[in-house]
Image (tube, rainbow, N blue to C red):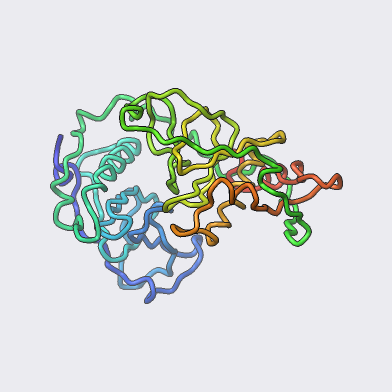
Amino acid sequence: MQAVSSIFDIRYGHSLELNALEQTSPKEGVAFVSRQRGGNGISAYVAPLDDVEPAPAGEVTCALSGNGVLTTCLQEAPFYTGFHVAILKPKIPLSKQQILYYCACIKQNRYRYSYGRQANKTLPKLLIPSPKEIPFWVGSTDLDQIKHASKPAVTAQPPKIEPQKWNEFRYDALFEIKKGNRLTKSDMSAGNTPFIGAIDSNNGYRQFISASPNHSAGTITVAYNGNGVAEAFYQDAPFRASDDVNVLYPRFDMSRYVALFICALIRQEKFRFNYGRKWHLGRMKEAVIRLPVASSGEPDLVFIGAYIKSLPYSMSI
């Protein structure tokens, strides 16, 4: 293991204020990298500044504080940075795969930090694998495997969405709803079974455990408690679910395209619930969801599937 500073030159970024810059389109502007977690750290595109040279493509940004602390990203175009963003430049020749590997290694130290403990002084001292310790698979990873990930599954224009014409359907008419089960620590040793908890990311995966699955693939999990209340995820592999999760077994032929459409609608119900008002099993059975309706009066699964397939990134589903 080596310190980050032994592999990268580290400097502070531009420390610019976004509200003092002119925002523009990605084609015309320069990427503005902040401390946010998503979007490769890019929060906007801004007009070039006459007196500030953008950092060059190929360098790495690392958030030093905030919710996105240690969010570390390879920037593939020139960029500016906001406050508390460091810029890392490799001291030695590294391939794109190796740089992305180091980005992931640095991000794994996020747990060490919080609002009260920033990474401004300690980033250079963090230990990451030496170049000799980089796994062999890193260099052979195909970075083009997601090259066309943003394309839609079909080339047709998205069908028109008209929610005012949709009908209400009770959840218990569309799904058999089952409650997850509480597990003890002894049941949660490391294994290969996905364990779905009441969290709002990673498709609900909290960890992998040794206990056998007790819920089927092709279902939707919905957290009814905690910070992730009303977070819905399609599960395409058998799994276990915590007792803070309801599992929706479809009473119809539900493709993953239809499931993702329904998940998006379920998440829109978050505002109705909190710690004092949980979306428990009984309440969910009586709740209704509005969906496109076919001439038969049933949910229009053909329309729903066609809509999702027409959206960007649907080729990756």
> Residue at (19%, 53%) from the top-left corner?
10
Q: Quadrant of the C terminus?
A: top right
Extreme-right residue of the structure: 295
Image vertical order of residue 109 relative to residue 277, above or below? above
Q: Position of residue 201 (x, y in %)?
A: 44, 46
Image vertical order of residue 158 relative to residue 193, above or below? below
Q: Position of residue 308 (x, y in %)?
A: 66, 45
Classify residue 171 as left or right of residue 143. right
Image vertical order of residue 124 relative to residue 26, above or below? above
Extreme-front residue of the structure: 282
Task: Mark yes or no: residue 316 visible.
Answer: no
Classify residue 226 as left or right of residue 126. right
Quadrant location of residue 154? top right
Q: Quadrant of the N terminus?
A: top left
Closer-to-camera residue (10/262):
262
Image vertical order of residue 160 relative to residue 125, above or below? below
> Residue at (32%, 51%) from the top-left corner?
71
Closer-to-camera residue (189/30):
189
Task: Mark yes or no: residue 259 visible.
Answer: yes
Q: Position of residue 58 (x, y in %)?
A: 33, 48
Q: Position of residue 107 (x, y in %)?
A: 29, 45
> Residue at (20%, 58%) from the top-left corner?
118
Question: How many dots with numbers?
Answer: 0
